[in-house]
Image (cartoon, rainbow, N blue to C red):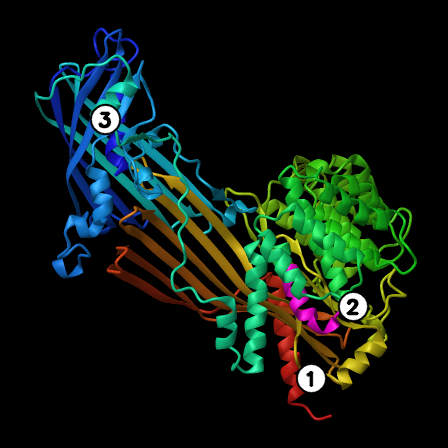
Amino acid sequence: MIVLTVLFLCIISTYSASVKGHTTGPSLSNDRLYKFAYTTEVYVDRAKASLQKSAGYRFSADVDVNLLWRNPENDDDQLIKVMIRNVQVENVNERPSDKSIFKGKSTEKIIRKEYLEALQKPMVLELARGKVRPLCNEGGSTKSMRNLLLVCCLFTSLPSGVFFNYFQILDVSTKATSATIYVLEDSFIKSIKAEENYVFLLNSRRKTGAKIVSKQRLELQSAEAGPGLIAGKHVAGVIKTLDSSYVSMPLVAETVKSECKNCPSVSKYRLQHLHLECSLVYLTLVLIVDAITSAQTPASLEAILEFLDFKDASTSVLQERFLYACGFASHPSEMLLRTLTSKFKGDIANEEIRETLVIVMGELIRKLCDREGCKLPAVVEAKKLILGRLEKPKKDDNVRMYLLALKNALLPEAIPLLLKYAESEEGHISNAAVTTLQRYDPSVLTNEVKKTMNRIYHQNRKVHEKTVRTTAAAIILNSNPSYMEVKNILLSIGELPLEMNKYMLSIIQDILQLEKPSRYIKFCLNKRIDFLHLCGHMKKTQVLISYSCKIERQYKRLLDLCVVIEAQGLESIIAATPDEGEENLDSFAGMSAILFDVQLRPVTFFQGYGDLMSKMLSATGDPISVVKGLILLTDYSQEFQLQSGPRASADFQGGLAIDISGGMEFSLWYRESKTNVKNRIAMFVAGNAEVDSFFLKTGMETTLEIETTLDFISTVQFSQYPFLVCMQMDRVGSPFRHSVTKYESLPSGRRYTARRGKVEMLEGCEYPLHQENSNMCRKVFSSASDSSGSWF
């Protein structure tokens, strides 16, 4: 096993400075045989668990070392012989014999006879001026045997391969430590103790993780009379004299490919599943599309694109799932963006798929740019396409979808275009541009942006919708506003439409209570503006309907979930007088969502009074899907080599099954509408830490799963103006499961497994919203109960 020769070379390399009379390398005494006892222990367990119950193994052996030859012209040129014997493998912790995979097995059966023989054959290494030359052993060994005996792994260990997640909060933190203690006696190393620790923790839940611990110990047992030196002038001649079968081994580990055993062929798998019902086949097909896309390899991308035909509208469900899986890719590639850009330029049967496609392209642009890939040809081409369509839009171009693409891309060079569309006369275009600007980091917003937002809010040039004005105000207050900007906004409160008064006050209060307010906001409120007077304008009026969840912690801010219900032009239904600037708005209701910082394609409940009546008469009661699919959230993989020789790996993968849907019930008779946004979520995270020796695998698997449903219900009564709006957010009871499995297995199939699990039920709850919302809900439900019990 390489662990022994590795640690022996560690002795040589560190001892070189302590040997008297030799400044370029160590020197062993002539005619002496040094006997060492070596032990290595490997533990794998949960991150915070004690080592007494960990999975793992203990490997021990005796090591004999003696000097074979010394160059008569240079004492620092030597041949050293290393001999390993009395190899033993056992459990790292005490365990009943019926739970031991080593019970009744000799070392020869555990390691296999050919490996044990190769391990116990003598090895010869050349040490020239403190540097190790390629070692020599008997020829005819396999790649695995040669890697087993490879001494140089201490000096040229293979670099670890690792995948990282785009969002740190969804990634895995790693901490690695290593320490070695040497004990000297009479200028000779008496013992060495070495320990290394690797800890892996989920950033989103620090209680879930794994650790790998490796301990080594080498002790000098005795130094006794040994064989004499071999006479000779050159290394090659000495080795030939010793044994002509010795061959030189390179100082680079060789790749060993493992073949899959008992794996069915693709054709055999398909034949086994031909009898399945069509509905089950389709369900399986949908999951396969999610899985293949999440693989994120060139081969999987080529395969899924060969299967999906964007010219066929009948497979639009599979196309949408593919596109959203691309948008949430943990490590997107230039090839993926180039492929989607090519598809966008081609024929697409479904216009909604075209819109989703360009929105996902924007997300891929942002992720690649964040990884310093803005100058990649595919990124440049995609940016040129989106910006070009906005600079010179055609008559039939859907400008809004390109603005939504920029809402994901967040390109600094797109800000002038966004300012142009922010002052558009079309409300939905202006709103899309302003909400896109709101997602930018304040540091990239120029003075020109603030000037434009001030013009929009104060309506210096033209009249704008309330939603556009409130978003413009939020941008100003979040971008280090000046004293006059804050003062003008605060003074405007009271002169605004009724619902804007309340909303603007809530923004100010949130800044004061939850964020770090600008010193000008504090100064204006404390010195120049009567805050009690402002609060007097907080009338019970309609509020903008939205909810969001954010994950902050010490990582990059991540917008976990944001759902906005949009409605306009409802005044015409009850013959109320609309506010200034909203006289010509069509009746409209829809929903827009941002999930894990990815803007999704908005959905429309109805557009225009005629569409509303049509859908009311033909309504089936089924909700409209916003997004449905499997999303790969956590994708972490790392391989590394322990100092004791074996290869170790840590893999964490987390998936999210999500189904966001919304429905609207509209009653002209009761003059009431009810919107229900249902968020059904199931999350599963699996982690695996494993140490793979050639004769034994030991590891730990941990799983975490939870499923829940969030219901966001908004009830609007428009029998009077301003409307009464009640918002409710409920979470149903949620099962939470956590399990840990430790295992040890031999190539023969014998396996030890210890499982431990925990199941909890998280009680359902109703989330408290604004106090004014609670007051309004009382009014809504009291009026509803009165109307239900009265005659007409």
Give the residue number, with chain letter if any, for mark 3: 181
The numbered mark, 2 or 1, whose residue comes first in the sequence reads 2
Judging from the image, what secondary structure is the residue with disc 2 in?
A: loop
Total tally of numbered discs in the picture: 3
Q: Nearer the viewer, residue 93 or 684?
A: 93
What amino acid type should be assigned to the residue bearing mark 2?
Answer: Ala
**Relative horizontal placement of residue 530, taking residue 761 as reference (left or right):** right
CA distance separating discs 3 and 1: 74 Å
Residue in the picture at 22% in, 23% down: 241
Residue 102 image position (x, y, % from top left): 17, 54
Q: Nearer the viewer, residue 29 or 653?
A: 29
- Judge the density around disc 1: few (<14), some (14-19), many (≥20) Cα neighbours within 10 Å: few
What amino acid type should be assigned to the residue bearing mark 3?
Answer: Ile
Task: Identify the magenta region.
Answer: 312-324
Residue 792 image position (x, y, % from top left): 73, 92
Residue in the picture at 21% in, 12% down: 19
Residue in the picture at 85% in, 78% down: 610
Residue 620 is marked as: 1
Residue 401 image position (x, y, % from top left): 78, 57
Q: Kindly indicate the quadrant of the structure image that contains residue 311.
A: bottom right
Above or below for 153 versus 80: below
CA distance separating discs 2 and 1: 26 Å
Answer whether residue 714 is magenta in the image.
no
The numbered mark, 2 or 3, whose residue comes first in the sequence reads 3
Give the residue number, with chain letter if any, for mark 2: 349
Q: Which callout, 2 or 1, points to the residue nearer the camera?
A: 2
Dominant secondary structure, magenta: helix
**Relative horizontal placement of residue 249, taking residue 632 as reference (left or right):** left
Q: Is residue 625 visible?
A: yes
Answer whether residue 316 is magenta in the image.
yes
CA distance separating discs 2 and 3: 69 Å
Above or below for 791 versus 76: below
